[in-house]
Amino acid sequence: MDQTIVRSALFVPATRPERIAKALGSGADAVIVDLEDAVAENLKAQARANLDAFLDANPQARVLVRINAPEHQQQAADLALCLRQPGVVAVLLPKAQSAAQVERAAACGKPVWPIIESARGLLELPAIAQAGGVERLTFGALDLGLDLGLASGTDASQRILDQARYAILLHSTLAHLAPPLDSVFPDIKNSEGMTRMAADARDMGFGGLLCIHPSQVALIHDTFMPGHEELDRARRVLAAVASGDGVFVVDGQMVDAPVIEHARRVLRRAGSPYA
């Protein structure tokens, strides 16, 4: 499992190459250059040329690429770009619906992040998660909700989407994948809603979120950073482990293996070298 911490993965359209450098300077843990939904059909080739030129001119840059969907005629050209460009470090596969689709994408030699966006994708999730080349999972709540016929933005729709989140967490764990990423929060100006969604994703066990605007990055990072009390307790638990005692108590509570592992994860989330 890749232990790289990805709390925020920021989309930027390949039709706006001047924004790629800005996105890379936003502080996001990962930048996803989009060749799919953010690009009109008549601009697909130009978008790909833009990304190619940017990576040639900036050999130090490292980006992820959301390629076109498996049945799209442009996908092969997208994968060829990802294969030849060392600056592409992973591929996001939209509308993933089978292990075979994932393995075709992985043939470009880059890790694949399947995006679950349909009922078929959810049904095939066990096989998708176990497919060769998969690094981590994510999903698209808007597309999935549309395919399932949900009323977007309602409490009822969230209850269904939470079941999809559970499935993604479950199969990420079973396949020993990196922590999955939650879907985007589309209301850019609603910082309170963004923070609430990030907190829910954190508490559910997601590693982070996809995001669509640089202003969302700091909100996500602040939310995923453990608080002082949580960090302090985690450090005291691991200090007690280092003492060599087999069974011990911290803050009046017995500490066992799950508590120790949780403390390590808290420190890892904070970027602590002691994790």
Image (spheres, rainbow, N blue to C red):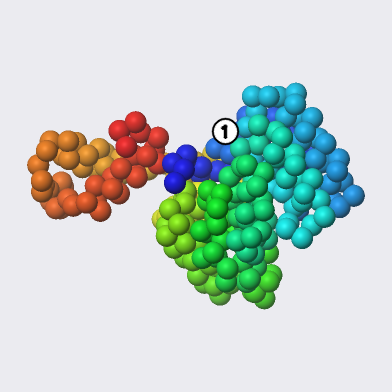
Where residue 140 sits in the image (x, y, percent)? 63, 59
Where residue 226 sits in the image (x, y, percent)? 37, 43
Residue 95's quadrant in the figure? Answer: bottom right
> At 44% from the left edge and 63% from the top edge, which residue is drawn?
170
Q: Is residue 6 visible?
A: yes
Q: Is residue 248 left or right of residue 192?
A: left
The answer to whether residue 41 is above or below residue 116 is: above
**Disc 1 residue type?**
Gly
Mark 1 Cα-neighbour bin, 10 Å: few <14, some 14–19, many ≥20: some
**Quadrant where the C terminus lies?**
top left
Label 1 secondary element: loop
Q: Nearer the viewer, residue 261 or 156?
A: 261
Name the residue at the right extreme: 42
Q: Nearer the viewer, residue 37 or 1?
A: 1
The answer to whether residue 164 is above or below residue 108 is: below
Q: Is residue 190 visible?
A: no
Q: Which residue is mark 1?
A: 27
Residue 51's quadrant in the figure? Answer: top right
Q: Is residue 252 left or right of residue 14?
A: left
